[in-house]
Amino acid sequence: MTSIKRAKLITGILFMTPSLVIYSLYMIIPVPYALYLSFFRWNGISPKILVEISNWGRILVDSVFRKSLLNSIYIGVACIFLQVPLGLFIALLLVAKHLKGKKVFQTVYVIPLLLSAVAVGILWKFYLDPTFGVVNNFLLTVGLPNLRRPWLGDTSTALFAVIVVEVWQFAPLYMLIFGAALSEVPQHLYEAAVIDGASSLECFWHITIPLIRGVYITATTIALVGSIKMFDLVWVMTEGGPSRATELMATYMYKQTFHRLEFGYGATIGVALFGIAFGLGILWLRLMKHSVLSGQKV
Amino acid sequence: MIGKRIGKRLVSMLVIIGGVLLLLVGSSSVALSKKVITFWYIEPEPFATMIEDSIKRFEEANPDVDIKGVQYPHQQYKTKIRVVLAAGNPPDIWFLWGDEGVRPYIEAGMVHDITDLVHEMDAMETGVPIYDYFLPTAWDLVTQKGRIWGMPGCMITFCVFTYNKSLFNRYGVTIPETYSELKSLIVKLQQAGLEHPVALANKAKWAGLYWLAMISLRLGGIDLWEKVRSRDASFTNPVFVKTFEENQELVRMGAFSEGFQGLDWDAGQDRALMYTEKAALALYDNDLPDYMVTEAGTEFFEKVDVFPFPRIVGGKGDPNTGYGTPGAHFFHVSKTCPYLKEAVEFIPYLSDRIAIEERLRYGRVLPVKGIEDLLVKYPRAANIYDLFFGFGRVLANLDVIFFLPEMGDEIMDVSQDVLGLEITPEEAVKRLDEAITAAYGPLRK
């Protein structure tokens, strides 16, 4: 290796070290430790009791865990099929050349993303108040009183409400991501296609999609994995209730650990959550690489 | 030359890392000369200011001590304290509600034994030992195995109905003497246009528990609960099944607020219904009106009063049984606190003469001896005092006092599921039996 190359390598390593240290402390070390804890029964304050695989046996038959897994998957699916496309849709609207007030729209749409999950949760808790909330009162005003629901108080609507809020908060993120990706698409390709007689839909399908394919795959993977481990928004809005209607793997893990003082079982759920999010992420990437978006000639 | 370049980069990297570390370390050590004691509490305004004033009075008498008080909302505190206790870095002074709820932490040695200190040290300048400053009953919930592990610092609380007197007058309803009269009252208010007359915010699950506790107490008495805990009785006792049936009947009647399972108590989503006269009564602790002063002003505060849960005809429970605690929050000193004596000296200031009187104004009674002269001045508080000490016996709160944390949690879950009509009463009692067996052992034959 030349001395310049070596210098660059060492510089690179030096710059990576702080993030590697933080990554190890918060990611690489805790996961094996959680796996270790999952073989014990521990209330967090007394000595640990070795129970081998009994926590893992328990999680396989735990109906609440199954429910939380299903709920987490619903949210993941909703994020892939609602949040990301919505972000793309808004980005496409905003990329229009002659749109007046583009900057205003961009600023306004980004606001939900700038709020913390706790602030968003509290805000929507009031919006969704069955008696005083904006949503129900709006429905009443526009002549749709029968659509009013106790959104966060009813097991049949709570998860739906949480999903809507989650989509509302993070669609702007994908709007920004796709906005950047779309601006990279060379304009002359569209001009050439229009000259050849292509419609807007054909331009979108044959030019835009293939050229933002990589970004789309990354975005949906982030959405899927991120939503499966969601915690803060749900916690503030419903604490996983009512009656576990919005229980997610993360909230269930939290409750088992800190409310039931079952650290071993909580760790088990945590490791399962990690494994499932990891596995689903890989699966999704594989699926995407072999799908219509893979750039194969259509 | 290359070495110099690397050297420069290395030095600049180290400077940046060093600077960041210094910032992190430096920001945590502020006044090295003063003894700093961290203290967490949940009482909101106007009581938070009273607590800060108590802190000031203590610091004036003890200039070498700096008490850092932090106020958290109720549910947030419950979340945080469990996390920091499990992580082993709790604040120096923290509270729980005593008895079984704090037993795991006492048994794990996380809390100082202050028995000797409370007998030796005087409460403030009174010349009276701390132990004798408070009412004897106030020490019960922090005494385990004959030793004292915490101190009272908050008020007497017990379950009562808070109701809007003016609404009752308007709709011609009176305080019910029996449970059936209560149900008729609810129906009458509904017919008058109050669709859901009973305010309830059950997102955090403990709110609905009052209905479980009071009905079961009237039907079966406190002995049944104590027998269940000592494993001499089971939850399958018909009293509990009937209690859950009654809970579900109230839900089917539409007695409770719209969407009550999703309403947030901390955010006052059910109290808002009372303020806007969409609800006329609520079953909580006697301190509910206190929140109304700050939220809705003294005008509304003057409109509300309290009445006890009525008796159930045919019920075996003594109608004069209360559901509450003589001190609500009991403060503990962590083993990690380096200033035990100062901490023990500080806590009684939360109940000093000024603090007592400020709270009596709102009807809050601190469990301190010899306040009869003050009570005379505040009839609302005197009423609370008389009601509580007029009870034959008192059942401690099921979620945070009477049971170990995991059992308290399961009771809340079951109660919420029952009120959500998700499970039958039979399924509910079966779940409770399983949970109590896991927490306290099998039923004794």
Image (cartoon, coloured by chain):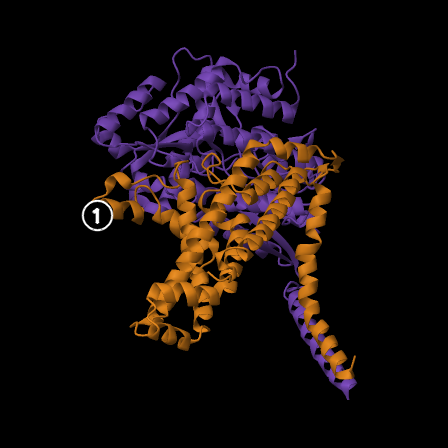
Query: Residue B211 or B435: which is nearer the viewer?
Result: B435
Residue A98 drawn at (x, y percent): 30, 74
Residue that appears at 36% across and 45% down: B293
Using the image, determine if residue A49 lies above or below residue A220. Answer: above
User: Which quadrant holds residue B196?
Assistant: top left
Using the image, determine if residue B183 lies above or below residue A186. Answer: above
Q: Chain of mark 1?
A: A
Query: Could you tell whether A22 is left or right of B398 in the image?
Result: right
Query: Residue A243 or B197: which is nearer the viewer?
Result: A243
Residue A18 drawn at (x, y percent): 68, 67
Judging by the rendered image, the residue that carries numbered circle 1 is A142
Tag 1's secondary structure? loop
Residue that appears at 53% across and 60% down: A218
Query: Residue B11 or A207: which is nearer the viewer?
Result: A207
Question: Which residue is outermost to the bottom?
Answer: B1
User: Which quadrant holds residue B85?
Assistant: top right
**Residue B69 visible in this rendered orientation of the protein:** no
- Give the colour in which the image draws chain A: orange
- Give the colour in which the image draws chain B: purple
Residue that appears at 29% across and 37% down: B303
User: What's the amino acid at mark 1?
Assistant: Val
Quadrant for the N terminus of chain A in the image:
bottom right
Using the image, determine if residue B352 lies above or below residue B177. Answer: below
Residue B10 drawn at (x, y percent): 74, 78
